[in-house]
Amino acid sequence: MENSNNHLDVEKKSERSETVDLNDNTLQVDISDALSEREKVKFTVHTKTTLKDFAKQDFSVVRQHEEFIWLHDRFEENESYAGYIIPPPPPRPDFDSSREKLQKLGEGEGSMTAEEFKKMKQELEAEYLATFKKTVAMHEVFLCRLANHPIFRADTNFRVFLEYEQDLSVRGKNKKEKLETFLRSFSKTTDEILLGSTQKDVDEFFDKEKSFLLDYHSLLKDATVRADKMTKAHKDVADHYIKISSCLLEMATADTNQLERFATKTADIFEKARKIENRVSTDEDLKLSDTLRYYMRDTTAAKNLLYRRLRCLADYEGANRALEKARAKNKDVHAAEWSQHQACEKFEQMSAKGKEELIDFKVRRVAAIKKNLVELCELELKHANVTTPFTFSLKSF
Amino acid sequence: MADDRHAPKLDDEFNDDDLFASAIEIKVEAKADISLEDDRSNGLSPIEEQSHNLSAADEIDLNSDSEYKDGVPDTKAKIELRSEPEDIFEDIPEPKEVHRETMAGRSTLETLVTSPRTQSCNAYHAGTMIEDEKVITAESDGKFITISVKDPQKIGDGISSFLTYNVVTHTNIGLFKKTEMTVSRRFSDFLGLHDKLAEKYLHKGRLVPAPPEKNVVGTTKVKMAGGQTEHEGKLPEFVERRRAALERYLIRIAIHPIFQVDPDFREFLECEDELPRASNTSALSGAGVLRLFNRMGETVTKIAFKMGESDPWFEERHQQLETLESQFRRLQASLEGLYSHRRELAFATAALGKGLALLSNGEDHAGLSRALAKMAELHDKLEGVHNDQSNADFYILHELIKDYLSLLGVVKDVFHERVKAFQTWQHAQQMLAKKREAVDRWEATGRSDKVAPAKDEVLEWEAKVNRSQEEFDVISKAIKKELELFDLQRVKDFKAAFISYLEAQMKAQDKIIEHWETYMPEAKAIA
């Protein structure tokens, strides 16, 4: 993950690789480019590998968001991965809000001065760019986690995803399929809740984990929502600075006396302050909200793992009962035994793996949150320290 | 004493002589000072002149609030001086002592003349004075007056309750009885003061600052709220805004060289008793309704009458003020937006703090939990900072703009007064022409009995024409001066406000830095 061509990528990688083992560079995946076309975003997935299994050492393919989701689903469905936490899929690239704002700006063009309009347009473009970068990063993180996981990286679907140069012809789910997925998820949720309340877990560790994760997930969700609100408010404040600064500038040009210079300078200061506030808000957004959000999704994945395990346990116990019944009736004992044995094995395996994964998850989470908090701190300080000299310079005027 | 009241001609006599026109009080001391300093070698001639001045001065003084006659040493000295010109020398030390501090370092008459302590009750004098003096603010010549409005208190209960404010004045201007005084005033008193000043000065072209607006909702809330104890320290925001606005209002009056020495203003600041209830400031009173009608009539005239502007200066100024007003309005709107958004930011930060606290409770990793808890605290503190900042936004900038918008309204009113004066003048001219025609007509038809009264009317209207023309000129000149003052003041106010706002911003940033710095080691310490 170190020797990437793009400097920006390196930064991003070091941010998001967290505590995954960076020394293993036999398979490096990154998103080297992204193109935004109307509704779709086309990612260029670039792979560098020393593994023999691949046809080439260095290659790229173009992928769309749906194909990422397809990949995630393949992992999710795969029974043998049941014991692992599947990395959460990246969110859909969402430019709607930016587009809306741009539209509104276009409509309101008459009511503000040319300069103001230009500035607001700049702001919006910067916002658009930021959203774009974020979605690229999310997709990349997803791929990197898969690539770094010792088991996942060997998955054939993953390999296909990376290598297959043609379009994977994964169409987005049509209505029927969407309905199916919805129903399935609905039943799954009810099942989950039912299991959660009825199924007693033999292992205390998992029990604790389950209640912890449930709580944690909802708390994270809550915190994310609030963090988002705060970032938005910050942005609004920054936007207003534009208006004020342009007002002042106007006053300055109209004023013929000494107030002119003063007003111009003040307008300047507001401008700068605005930029900084904006930067603060985006940083906050990046570090805090995104981290919270990501871990929220990760927690969901962990919850899924637990659910699967629980399901497995239920199956195991069901198999046990079936076996007993069979033994009692002395019919199909062998089949029942065998299925019970299967279930047992599966369950044990899953428990072992699951335990590992969950512990790992905790460690990862703590480290990531810590890192992001520290970085947030540093950035805030940096910004606050920059604003002070500005305002100071005006006093001397 | 009453005898001396009938000497208006004395005033007119001295009208031409700018130097001695109105700052006559000062003249007394000044001359006294000089005569003392100059070894009393000036002889009696200046003193004889003085006696004339003194009677005039005395007369003026008598015209002003008689309440102060006993308290003010000036008047006392004058009264004695008037009756016994020869004893001037003996009596001079008195006023000199009183005003010693103000006289310090001054030896020329010119500086004295240009002191802002002009008698304001005789507006004509004031008008001519200002023409020649440089526009000087209250801080010049070592004179100062600082006013603050504090301690809003609710008196009484229920519907008849009201709020009083303590008005504290520090000054070394000699016209005031004491150097420090505190009085208790209620809102309608302030409105009453405005009415009195407006009555006296608006039609002369002076910019009388506008008082803060009435606020029915807020006032009723205060009235209806429970007992006094629960109010202590928790008075609604609107009271704080009003208090600040009242303070600014009084300071603006005090800075104006003419209003500063106005007797009504002085009474407002000094009189320890309750002022007579200015009940005609209430919206529902008879005077209020009358005011409403007047307003409507004026608005119609404003639209209907287009004055042929002879002075390009006014044209230009008018334009400029219109643009300024629209700019102010825009600025005000954005400031309001900024204020509300920053409030939102503060709320959101607090909410995040709570969310983080909950999260930290749910977190089982001890280190992370502690860090999250600290972060929750941090965000709470940040909320405080943001709240303070938004207060600064509001009180410093927004209120300033609002004040200036209302001042611009006053300027427009003053312009309108000028238009009215012009109208009167035109009207008088028209009437004169008509009367002259009437005279000619009567002369032509040979009705000599009608000619005489008609000629009288002509004379009458000629006088009116002259008077109204003079008034028009006076008001135009006054407006020019006032606008100069206004501009200077505006520049000063804006600079001061923006600088203090930015200082507040700096402080806020410093606090933010502090908070984040204390948090940093916590974040790093996560095991």
Image: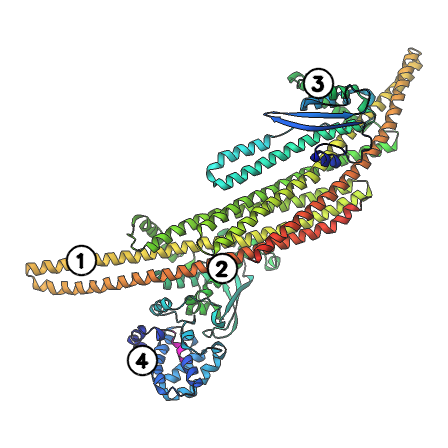
Asked whether B23 falls inside the magenta stretch, the response is yes
Q: Are marks 3 and 2 in contact (CB under 8 Å)?
A: no
Q: Secondary structure at mark 1?
A: helix
| Chain under callout 4 | B
Q: Point out the frontmost of discs 4 and 1.
A: 1
Nearer the N terminus, badge 4 or badge 2? 4
**Crowd class of label 4 (few under 14; some 14 to 19; many from 20; radius 10 Å):** few
Distance from disc 4 to disc 2, alpha carbons, whole Å, reads 47 Å
Q: A295 or B222, which is in the foreground?
A: A295
What residue did someone put label 2 on? B492
Name the main secondary structure of what is drawn in magenta.
helix
Vertical position of residue B193 compared to residue B387: above or below: below
Where the N terminus of chain B falls, by quadrant? bottom left
Q: Point out the frontmost of discs 3 and 2.
A: 3
Vertical position of residue B499 compared to residue A327: above or below: below
Give coordinates of residue B52: x percent, y percent: 33, 81
What residue did someone put label 4 on? B3
Nearer the N terminus, badge 4 or badge 1? 4
Inspect the image, locate mark 4, and give the three-letter code of the amino acid beneath it.
Answer: Asp
Inspect the image, locate mark 3, and give the three-letter code of the amino acid beneath it.
Answer: Glu
Q: Secondary structure at mark 4?
A: helix
The residue range painted magenta reads B22-28
Inspect the image, locate mark 1, and give the three-letter code of the amino acid beneath it.
Answer: Ala
| Chain under callout 1 | B
Same subunit, tags 4 and 1: yes
Same subunit, tags 4 and 2: yes
Same subunit, tags 4 and 3: no
| Chain under callout 2 | B
Q: B215 or A355, which is in the foreground?
A: A355
Q: Which mark is residue A165?
A: 3
Q: Which mark is residue B433?
A: 1
